[in-house]
Image (cartoon, rainbow, N blue to C red):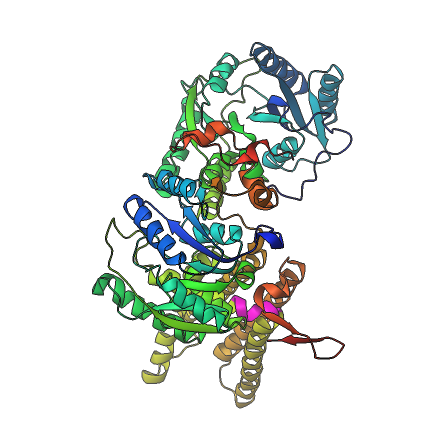
Amino acid sequence: MRVAVTEADRLDLSVVIPFLNEEESIGLLCEKVAAALDPMEVRAEVILVDDGSTDQTFARAAAIADRDPRFRVIQLRRNFGQTAALSAGIRHARGEVIVTMDGDLQNDPRDIETLLDKMHEGYDVVIGWREQRQDKLITRKIPSILANGLIRWVMGTQIRDNGCALRAYRADLLQALPLYSEMHRLLPTIMTLSGARLAQVKVRHHSRQYGASKYGLSRIYKVLMDLLALKSVLGLVHLPFFGFGAAAVLFGLGAGLGFVVTLLYLVVGLPIVVMAGVTLLLSALSLFMLMLGMLSELIYRQGPLKLEHTLKITTVAPREGGASLHVS
Amino acid sequence: MYDPRLSPASSATSPATAVGSLDLSAIIPVHGVDGARVRRVIGEYRAVLDTLDLTYEVIVVVSGRDPDLTEAMTNLAREGAVRVIVLGAWPGAATALSIGFAHSTGRLLLTLPPLHQVAVEALPELIGALGERDMLVVRRWPRRDGRLKQLQTRAFAFFLRTTLRLPFKDLGCGVRLFRRDVLDTVYIYGDQQRFLPVLAERYGYHVAEVDLPQAPRGEGGGPRASFLPAAYVRRLLDLLSIFFLVNYTIKPLRFFGLTGLVTFLAGTIMTLYLAAERVFMDESLADRPLLLLGLLLVVLGVQLFAIGLIGELIIYIHARNLTTYTIERLVGFEASAEEDAGAMSAMSGGVTSASDEASGGEARALHPAADRPR
């Protein structure tokens, strides 16, 4: 998914920041990012993604890019949403590590170094955890607590704060992932499920200084549906037949049981309409699931998805001769 | 992202010149009309285009199923008036357009109907009106056809505006002018040509509607109003398909999940109610028609949900080829990085500097993709 980069162009760090109508914040934020990067001994770039702003955001971003060669700007044709904006930045990133953050000054660029230090300990994803969140309780914090709990429960991960935009990813893993709809919040979850090592560090969080919040609280239904979709898809993707096949077996067993009971009713002389109905229904469902299982097998087989898109694969060379593949 | 299903120009119709060497390509999908009339209409189109100071080509995509029509068009091609692409079967006007597009070389594309919908003298006005926008769609106005046909158009536009908040007043008009970039990004097929402006706008292109007078009826004029119920069914299906295209092509489970859950819950409640009556009030189940409905809804709910999951699986597996955004311009990126941007520079490729400037910022021609050789 990345733009092809020759090895010489490779940098240590790419900071990707999506902006939507942040003309007041962008200048100050970029100054802070530059100030945070200066003392760090890394070859870094900062990619500012203008997600279809209607104010002076792009003009200011372009002016910054003119002054400081580390800054680069991508302007999208219209507002495509935060995930798309991040996705554009990630595709164009050349760094070994990609750090994402919000463009509204609520994240503190000084934390980038904290995240990087943690990455150097050997983690694949390091995400910020806003311990002292500076947001409104009712409209922002409580929905966030509920959503985080839901995500932990459904996906079975231990991520405390899925809403914090300040994160660091290993670029090659991140750039292999599909990214669409509103998936950016779940990226660490997806990566954990594909075997990446995840760490969480406390980060600073400031209250909003300028402008209004652009990406409000997501509707719970959407989150729930997206989670369910992702959970099933990630579960199905390597064993496409298994999920629907298991459902088919379950319904099939029910149908078998119903059939036996129907026979018993018949022998005893009870009316069989209800039991026969249930049996037929369950067998229909079983058959349907079987067909869907085959369908998903077909989709998987014909699709362009490669294993490394959903699975972290590490090769470890043995000390002497030969090669062994270690899949983690 | 241009769909790879369409291979670039085949040898028979291959353009001798490179893409972008002409100012304008007019594409006319021809199907189910009288050859002699189309011939006359194309002649009139050419007469008008000749008066303009631009280089152009006319590409006719014709259904090979109609031998008379094919012959008429082939003769036209022999006379050097047009380039003709004969399709073995008619795949729908949008697919025909896509094929015509794949064989075209113009920087601007003009789609024209095989019979006049718009007064042909007004075409130069359309071409002059593009300015810095990416696409112009035509609203036939003032109208000259029957009240019923006008009412149909208005009713359709009303539904579009109220249910889907789409501003287009006349999507039935086949006259459209757009930059090459639009069809490079937006892939249409089947009967979707009607919705090309809707899709283009979703990709961030600047689309505007302009009024052009409708062609007078009679020789070479458009078909008369159809009173067939089939036409209404078609419109309804059109509406449904835009609804899905606009809302749920990326997240099928949001739609199927909701309908599935509602159906499933309704069925479960009915079944539980019956079961409770059976257990606690000793009512017989066998003669309750509600049981049938309840169970049916349960099954339907499960199936809808499962189909939504299949949809998600398809999207996830193909997600790497999805275009979820288009780029207006890049600042500070080296040419080499953009060269290999793959699908992405194909998306942003062909953006002329005019449209760059239209977007508000200062004129900073920083993204060289416009001149990138293909």
Q: How far across and down, in percent of the image, does residue B187 sit?
A: 57, 40
In magenta stretch: residue A267 = no
Report the residue at 73% width, 23% height from top. B68
Report the residue at 30% width, 65% height from top. A204
Report the residue at 59% width, 65% height from top. A292
In magenta stretch: residue A239 = yes
The image shows residue B81, relative to residue B350, as above or below, that is above
Report the residue at 64% width, 21% height from top. B58
Q: How far across and down, in percent of the image, does residue B308 sit?
A: 50, 60
The one nearer the camera, B310 or A237, is A237
Q: How far across and down, in percent of the image, does residue A321 sit?
A: 76, 77
Q: Is residue A229 visible?
A: no
Residue segment shown in magenta: A233-240
Q: How far across and down, in percent of the image, does residue A84 sit?
A: 45, 51
The majority secondary structure of the magenta stretch comes to: helix
The one nearer the camera, B360 or B90, is B360
The image shows residue B339, relative to residue A281, as above or below, that is above
